Amino acid sequence: MTDTDELNADVVVIGGGPVGENVAQYAVEGGLSAALVEGELLGGECSYYACMPSKALLRPIDVAHTTAHLPGVEDAAVQPKELLARRDTWVSHYDDSGQVKWADGADIALVRGHGRIVGEKRVEVSGPDGTRTVTADRAVVLATGSVPVVPPVFDGVSPWGSRDATGVVEVPERLLVVGGGVIAVEAATWMAALGSQVRMLVRGPALLEKNEPFAGDIVRSALEKAGIAVVLGADVTSAVREHADDTGLGRIHGGEVTVTTSASGTFTADEVLVATGRRPNLADVGLDALGLSADDVRSGTLPEWLHAVGDAGPGAPLTHMGKYEARVLGSKLAGADEAPAPANVPVPQVVFTDPQVASVGQSEAEARSALGDDAVVTSEVGFGTAAGTSLLRDDADGRAKIVVDRRRGVVMGATFVGPDAAELLHAATIAIVGEVPVSVLRHAVPSYPTASELWLRMLEQLPRDLR
């Protein structure tokens, strides 16, 4: 490519997060040329404002909590200044020069600016140096990620979003967290460890409602033990703040906030974090120029040359699933002859609270809804029922559960809640993808004493005819 107003590439990707990078990388590796359009930091939300900074904050906290549950070790303490410094290192101090160097080395053309489709295979990029048009010979890919959903009740309040929470600079003495999903429970964990007095306002009847019910119950109990107040059934009806002002990433956005809920009273705090979900970032990508809508993207009703992946697409809004979709798409665009993917790829997810929640595939309720009650059998054990998990902490609280299709004798879903539960998850993912019969899984001998013994405990509790 040449540095002119008109650029051409086989594949033009709008969005330079991990998903967009993977599409471009696999297309180039397959012999195509690729242009990556990004208006913010190359590397996207995950690298600077979501996955990486949140886990950089949570891991030391997890280690400190572990030492408090292991006799023979002096309790470790969280050091806020050093913890935030670790976060800054992992987000490269919000400098994407390393990512730019990678793109250059991978022979991917980076185009800075906001990309918008203006016609068939044509993308207009408005950047710091003016407007350019990039034309794709084969495909345009939307990898624009997602944006927070902020209820109108918070208009004029300038609340914190997830970026402020991961990029925290000024730790509020009192913090309200609105929401009960993954972002909410993780942010509550690290903000409390940094010294905030945290109160969660959850509209629904439980935390982490998309998981097995015991997951939310165990996490709620752990949060409350950590000094975090959890208020359920708290639907926010009004929010007021004097002198609201977006003072910058992670800084307190004005004066005291007063939040009123439908049934649980009024609460005041120094800051409020709104973590009430996200939606695909499709508002200004040029769908209207093609006579399309966000609903068309969700349903997959797109022209042959246009694709949407990651949070912007119809799949699960998780970085690792988006990257998987991107690898498959990039290879397909390049004409790679690969083995077909399974019909149903299970979605794994880890919530990095203490204890961790790790799940993949279908919950019991989802499986029974899909197959009927008679076709589903489950096995559930305490997290500390094996020597390997008991050794992790002297009070290894939690649960482990598998959901099995009785007719086929294969695992449909699994959930682990407990210390280091994340490291148990991939075995479950492999079992589901490979459709390995539980009768065969019994011959996968877990090393003693390791957390993998939980598998043996669960398999032993299944009906004899399945074993």
Image (cartoon, grey):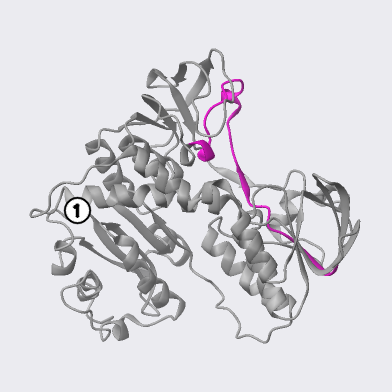
Please tell me which residue is depicted at 81% across the width and 52% down the height of the picture: 292
Q: Callout 1: few (<14), some (14-19), or many (20+) C-alpha neighbours within 10 Å?
A: some
Location of residue 292 with respect to 141 vertically, above or below: above
Q: Which quadrant, please, contains the C terminus?
A: bottom left
**Where is residue 456, by image quadrant?**
bottom left
> Which sits in the foreground, 376 or 162?
162
Q: Please say whether residue 293 is visible from this viewpoint.
A: yes
Please tell me which residue is depicted at 47% across the width and 32% down the height of the picture: 273
Q: Position of residue 344 (x, y in %)?
A: 54, 72
> Which sits in the foreground, 99 or 439?
99
**Where is residue 15, by image quadrant?**
bottom right
The residue labelled by disc 1 is 397
The magenta region covers: 136-164
Q: Position of residue 190 (x, y in %)?
A: 36, 41
Please tell me which residue is depicted at 39% across the width and 82% down the height of the picture: 436
Q: Amino acid at mark 1?
A: Asp
